[in-house]
Image (tube, helix red, strand yellow):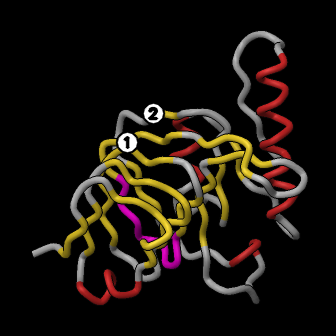
């Protein structure tokens, strides 16, 4: 089931965002459905251990509390798939072209899910990485990225993204 959170009113902008959000879910999912919502409580739950392997937003979202990305998930929700988790901060058309990017803001994002990727868009806040395989894919972190160990930093893929603050290993 795909979940959409739409604001009041019925205008073309909302319809376009819902259509492109549906495209993200349909094009990236084979077996399971992406969780798609702009409600802060849904975002927190969707990235928790009880959430899904992929989570998408369709407009800018601001969280007032820290976000913890936790749990081990598999690509496309299949147990036989690689361990993988994704935060999609964008919408796309039927040809997989990114049509819009969004910003997720939180004081801190703590990443405890292995192989967690932030795809497109911007995260505003600091990121603390406590799991291997963190990745920025054409996305930006407006803040600092701190890894719990050098090994976690070495396993990260940051060269396809941007970090505006410092990238360090915790002392």
* x and y, in percent, of residue 49 in the image: 54, 64
Taking the image as shown, residue 115 lies to the left or right of residue 52, namely left
Nearer to the camera, 143 or 99? 99
Q: How many marks?
A: 2
Q: Residue 165 occupies which quadrant of the picture?
A: bottom left
Taking the spot 78% from the left edge, 43% from the top edge, the residue there is 21
Dot 1 and dot 2 residues touching (CB under 8 Å): yes
Residue 147, above or below 104:
below
Could you tell which of marks 1 and 2 lies nearer the N-terminus?
A: 2
The secondary element bearing badge 1 is classed as strand
* x and y, in percent, of residue 164 in the image: 30, 53
Q: Residues within 10 Å of mark 1 (few under 14, many from 20)?
A: some
What residue is disc 1 on?
106
**Outermost residue to the left:** 171
Taking the image as shown, residue 92 lies to the left or right of residue 45, namely right
The secondary element bearing badge 2 is classed as strand
- Residue 10: tell me if it is visible: yes
Q: Is residue 137 magenta?
A: no
Residue 132, above or below 112:
below
Taking the spot 67% from the left edge, 38% from the top edge, the residue there is 58
- Residue 1: tell me if it is visible: no
Taking the spot 27% from the left edge, 73% from the top edge, the residue there is 147
Rendered-image quadrant of the C terminus: bottom left
Residue 168, above or below 21:
below
What residue is disc 2 on?
62
* x and y, in percent, of residue 50 in the image: 59, 60
Residue 103, above or below 138:
above
Q: CA distance from mark 1 to mark 2?
A: 6 Å
The magenta stretch spans which residues? 109-116
Taking the image as shown, residue 162 lies to the left or right of residue 59, namely left
* x and y, in percent, of residue 51 in the image: 62, 58
């Amino acid at each position: 089931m795909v979940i959409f959170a739409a604001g009041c009113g019925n205008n073309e902008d909302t319809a376009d965002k819902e259509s492109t959000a549906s495209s993200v879910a349909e094009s990236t999912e084979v077996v399971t459905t992406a969780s798609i919502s702009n409600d802060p409580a849904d975002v927190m739950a969707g990235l928790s251990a009880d959430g899904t392997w992929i989570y998408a937003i369709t407009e800018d979202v601001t969280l007032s509390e820290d976000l913890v990305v936790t749990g081990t998930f598999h690509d496309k929700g299949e147990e036989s798939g690689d361990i993988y988790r994704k935060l999609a901060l964008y919408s796309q058309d039927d040809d997989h072209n990114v049509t819009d990017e969004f910003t997720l803001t939180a004081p801190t994002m703590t990443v405890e899910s292995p192989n967690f990727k932030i795809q497109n868009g911007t995260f505003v806040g600091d990121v603390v990485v406590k799991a291997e395989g963190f990745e920025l894919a054409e996305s930006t972190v407006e803040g600092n990225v701190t890894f719990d160990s050098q090994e976690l930093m070495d396993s990260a893929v940051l060269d396809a993204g941007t970090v505006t603050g410092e990238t360090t290993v915790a002392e």
